[in-house]
Image (cartoon, rainbow, N blue to C red):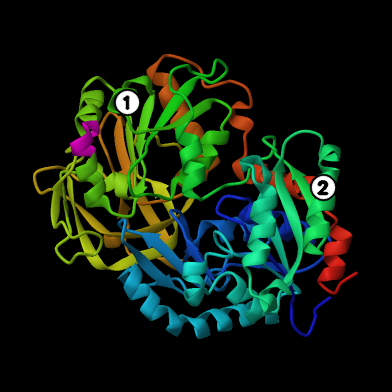
Amino acid sequence: MKFPRAKTLMFLGTGSDVGKSVLTAAFCRIFKQDGYAVAPFKAQNMALNSFITPEGGEMGRAQVVQAEAAGIEPHVDMNPILLKPTSSMGSQVIVLGRVVGNFSAKEYYAYKKDLVAVVREAFERLASRYDLVVLEGAGSAVELNLKDHDLVNLAMARMAQAPCLLVGDIDRGGIFASLLGSLMLMEKEDQEFIAGFIVNKFRGDPDLFRPGVRILEERSGRPVLGVVPYFQHIVVPEEDSVALNRRMAQSLDEKESFKRWRIGVVRLPYISNYTDFDCLEREPRLQVVYFDRPADVFLCDAVILPGSKNTIEDMLALERSGMADALRAYHKAGGVLVGICGGYQMLGRRIVDLQGAESRVQEAQGLGLLPMTTEMASNKLTCQAVARLRLPNPLSSDDLFPLYGYEIHMGRSRFAADAPARALLEVVRRNGLEVPEHESADGAWTDDGRVWGTYLHGIFDNDAFRNRFVAFLAARKGLATGGAGSEFFRFSQWKGEQYDLLADFVRRHCDVDRIYRIMGLK
């Protein structure tokens, strides 16, 4: 079914968090179900979460989810430019999976013109390998003050010659102003790319919105190709900061009665890769909450310090807010503390960044719960990794080999000379290559297992390890690990089921046949 050049479809939005990423994933799955080889594409993504491809390149997590929905391996061509905020004024810029440097907004705009060819070539490579490419825009498609620097919305639609569906979020209110206003603000030649509208997150009876559909179509001259209801029965990973704020809104005051253990994730100012905990959120025995109030530490059975895009600044923020003292007190009271990547670095004694790799502040004291020091290097380590737990270990079990994950870090952590080395993991392979023994140690742990950390993102995605961690929490309370779903929960299988549910749901509420015709397909 290979075409001379891939057919395209693009989702543009009236704003952020209107559902572009989810709809892109849905149509990647729909096209896969219908027998097409399909790939996602987003020219530029500003994201808190990233992933490492099999080749060792770093890309935005949303396009990884979309690639999973499409049934293909993620590749940096699907997200050639990734921006990871390091401060309120600047971001680390990653091009084709590799760090270029830290840029202010002004510096990046000046550099951006050099990236047009990079984006075009990445798109063309995908278009030559797949039947279909589903593109996603960013934020609002008509931010007029950013128009001259656009590389991801209508400029990308022109480059790809892609028919576009404009997505609006009716749950926010103002659906007519957002859809019709966005169309009106476009240049006439750009309006030609808008093939139709999708009204997303509709609550209630869609039949009641038929007059609204008629108004949109009459005033725009374009069809409404879907009225997609608001849903909560399907879960697709989200990476937008708005999605993280929704998690923050969950109350810590009352524990869900059917969940046995509560895992608290500290909401760092520069939190990154919180998708590490999606599997814990779906684990039937656990309740996962995100919090930033020091007092909430003591309501948790275990507390996780997540990854950080600016570890020193986040560590200083913990000290200023009183969270650091609360975490130390929680540890003294017998609590369980886990650190992933930047969070692991914060569990140590000291963090040093003499080269300004992440921060202008050169040094900060850590929590002092693990006997190691971290120094930031100028080069970032990015790799997929296979590891195993080192023995003896409170979390050890013969069935835990191998553990799959990925590493993304500027820091290099070393044990203090006055403390015995207690590495948590032995990394066996990085990017498919065997790791020498002297470079294989990763992470650290205390003898009682109450404090441990690792650089391995995705460690909880390993079902056996996650079950062992829950068993450790249960043993501390003298309880069995069972419960609804218990050890039978399989995260990767669950994700595949969610993509199928999403595709079936969107297919029911969108005119897929007409969308195929818009793309030039039957």
What's the residue type where badge 1 is placed? Val
Q: Give the residue furthest to the right.
A: 522
Q: In the rendered view of the protein, which quadrant contains the C terminus?
A: bottom right
Based on the picture, tell me whether residue 334 belongs to the magenta stretch.
Answer: no
Q: Decide: few, some or many residues near mark 1? Use Cα within 10 Å; few <14, some 14-19, many ≥20.
A: many
The circle on residue 63 is none
**Front-lying residue, 290 or 420:** 290
Q: Earlier in the sequence, mark 2 or mark 1?
A: 1
- Residue drawn at (41%, 65%) of the image: 434
Total residue callouts: 2
By secondary structure, the bulk of the magenta-drawn segment is best described as helix
For the point 53% across and 19% down, the residue is 256
Residue 404 percent across, percent down from the top left:
49, 52
Q: Position of residue 470 (x, y in %)?
A: 47, 28
Q: Is residue 398 visible?
A: no
Q: Which residues are magenta?
A: 318-323
**Which amino acid is tagged 2?**
His
Q: Residues within 10 Å of mark 2 (few under 14, many from 20)?
A: some
Label 2 vs label 1, nearer the camera: 2
Element at badge 1? helix
Residue highlighted by disc 1: 297
Under tag 2, what secondary structure?
helix
Q: Is residue 485 above or below residue 83?
A: above
Q: Which residue is mark 2?
A: 509
Real-space Cα separation, disc 2 to disc 1, in angstroms:
43 Å
Q: Residue at x 14, y 63 (%)?
A: 354
Question: Residue 450 lies in what quarter of the image?
Answer: top left
Please state, as top left, top right, bottom left or bottom right, where the N terminus lies in the image.
bottom right
